[in-house]
């Protein structure tokens, strides 16, 4: 059975360009751009020319997506740990991600989808 080829698989970078893209996407590389292009052994001008190329941008973005997708479980567990420790910002983020907290417009839309009618306030001359 033939494997489905993705757009990512069709992007072919080679040599130093490939190494540069991999280093740009790698979360473990914490160096500067200068350290990166010196490690790859390319010039400053070559580095800045290459990072503007569509193929390099697309390949790097796909690598970043693969790295981040692989960490979703760990990030989710870290968020839950913060929530359980009482971190208000983490709790707020949790409810936002779960669609249970947001701005008033989002709450109105949510209420409408559950058959709740929200009546506007009526102002009288009394205040």
Image (spheres, rainbow, N blue to C red):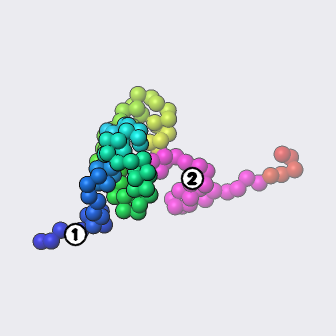
Q: Are marks 1 and 2 in contact (CB under 8 Å)?
A: no
CA–CA distance in space, label 1 to label 2: 41 Å
Magenta stretch, residue numbers:
96-122
Foreground residue among 109 and 21 = 21
Quadrant for the N terminus, please.
Answer: bottom left
Report which quarter residue 106 is drawn in: bottom right
Q: Which residue is situated farthest in the bottom direction here?
A: 1
| Residue 115 among magenta residues | yes
Viewer can see residue 45: yes
* Image side of residue 63 versus residue 105, left or right: left
| Residue at the spot of label 1 | 4
Report which quarter residue 57 is drawn in: bottom left
Above or below 120: residue 97 = above
State the image coordinates of residue 22 (x, y, percent, origin top left): 30, 49
Q: Which residue is situated farthest in the left direction here?
A: 1
Element type at mark 1: loop
Foreground residue among 56 and 70 = 56
Above or below 3: residue 58 = above
Category of crowding for the residue at label 2, using alpha-carbon neighbours closer than 10 angstroms: few (below 14), some (14–19), many (at least 20): some
Which label's residue is closer to the chain start, 1 or 2?
Answer: 1
Residue in view at x 40 percent, y 50 percent: 47
Residue in view at x 52 percent, y 61 percent: 113
| Residue at the spot of label 2 | 107
State the image coordinates of residue 112 (x, y, percent, origin top left): 56, 60
| Residue 111 among magenta residues | yes
Residue in view at x 61 percent, y 55 percent: 105
């Amino acid at each position: 059975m033939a494997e489905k080829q993705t757009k990512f698989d069709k992007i072919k970078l080679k040599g130093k360009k490939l190494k540069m893209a991999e280093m740009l996407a790698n979360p473990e590389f914490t160096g500067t751009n200068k350290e990166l292009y010196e490690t790859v052994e390319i010039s400053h001008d070559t580095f800045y020319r290459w990072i503007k190329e569509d193929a390099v941008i697309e390949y790097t973005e796909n690598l970043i997506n693969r790295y981040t997708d692989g960490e979703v479980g760990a990030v989710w567990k870290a968020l839950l740990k913060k929530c359980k420790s009482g971190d208000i910002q983490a709790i707020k983020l949790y409810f936002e991600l779960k669609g249970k907290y947001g701005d008033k417009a989002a709450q109105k839309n949510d209420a409408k989808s559950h058959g709740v009618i929200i009546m506007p306030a009526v102002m009288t001359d009394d205040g």
